[in-house]
Image (tube, grey):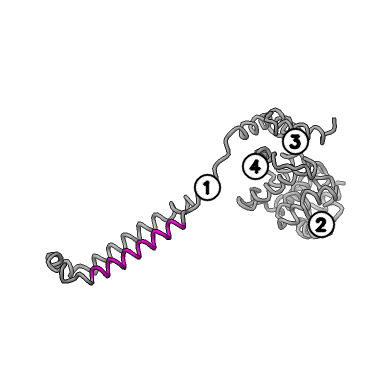
Amino acid sequence: MKPDDIDRILSTDDLLEPSSNFTAGVMAAISQPAEPPPLRFPWFRFLAGVFALLVMAVAGAVLLLHSAPALKPVIAPLAPLTALAPEFGYAIAVMLLSLALVAIPRILARS
Amino acid sequence: MRKEDQDAADVARVIAGDLCGFEAIVERWQHRLVSLAWRFCRDRATAEDMAQEVFVKVFRSLASFRGDSTFSTWLISVAVNTFRSRIRAEGQPLPDVDLNRLWDTTPSPLHELEERQRAEALRRAVLTLPERYRDAILVYYFEEKDMAESIRVLGVAEGTLKARLHRGRELLRRRCANLNPRAESAFEEAQ
């Protein structure tokens, strides 16, 4: 195609007649309230929560180590569970991880 | 009353709270805006939807229109930016068209039909250009080759626009050169 052809074709009218109800549609659209901007993911609160959890975990671990002798009578009945402890721990970790993965799309959609 | 004066009067009415002023603006500009949207997408439903989005956007930001440019320049600038963002976000709504297939028609004595096919193939080819060349070509020809108005709408320097037009036409010429030569020669014979 020659440059003159391109110029000639692009210079011709290329109009599209709007539908008969176009104006009514626009006027209806402007009457509706503007959509609020989408909520952003609360990263600050999320990180503050994670930090608080970490502090509590460390504090709990320290407390547990310091009061181990006093807790012995309480822990003694749970002794049989220690044989299952690793498997039990893995199962809980897998379950929590699965729940977290399932929740990710919903969290992203909200943000 | 001139169109610019009508626009200014209607804008003042809308700012004063009279919605009928905006209805008059829509009535006056709908053909032009829908036609511009059509050039950007070649799809009626999408064109009307994009044009409506522009009118809604213009209505909500009318109070910020300072009158530095004419209302028409501002309106078309908002439209081009809206169409550009929409296509960037949603992708080109144009269905995939094999330009060679579109061209590969049996030579017909109805060269008017072939001319229409040529025009449509070329206009679709424009939409496949990189954004800056596409916008330059669409706005320049939409503004009937008014360089000054195209510069105002696109907000670029004259040299930039000229370079983009040149490069865009060059790309178009190369892309359309690959079209089926049989149909091309048939068209020339028919003429």
Q: CA distance from mark 2 to mark 3?
A: 27 Å
Q: Chain of mark 2?
A: B
Q: Which residue is mark 1?
A: A38
Disc 4 marks which amino acid? Thr
Residue B124: x and y in percent read 72, 50
Q: Residues within 10 Å of mark 4 (few under 14, many from 20)?
A: some
> What secondary structure is found at the residue carrying circle 3?
helix
Q: Which residue is mark 4?
A: B46
Q: CA distance from mark 1 to mark 3?
A: 31 Å
Magenta stretch: residue A52 in it? yes
Q: Which residue is mark 2?
A: B157
Foreground mark, 4 or 3, reads 3
Q: Are marks 1 and 2 on the same chain?
A: no
Report whether A101 appears left or right of B77: left
Q: CA distance from mark 1 to mark 2?
A: 36 Å
Q: CA distance from mark 4 to mark 3?
A: 17 Å
Q: Would you say residue B150 is visible in this rendering?
A: yes
Residue B121: x and y in percent read 74, 49
Marks 1,4: beta carbons within 8 A: no
Label whose residue precedes the other's in the sequence (4 or 3):
3
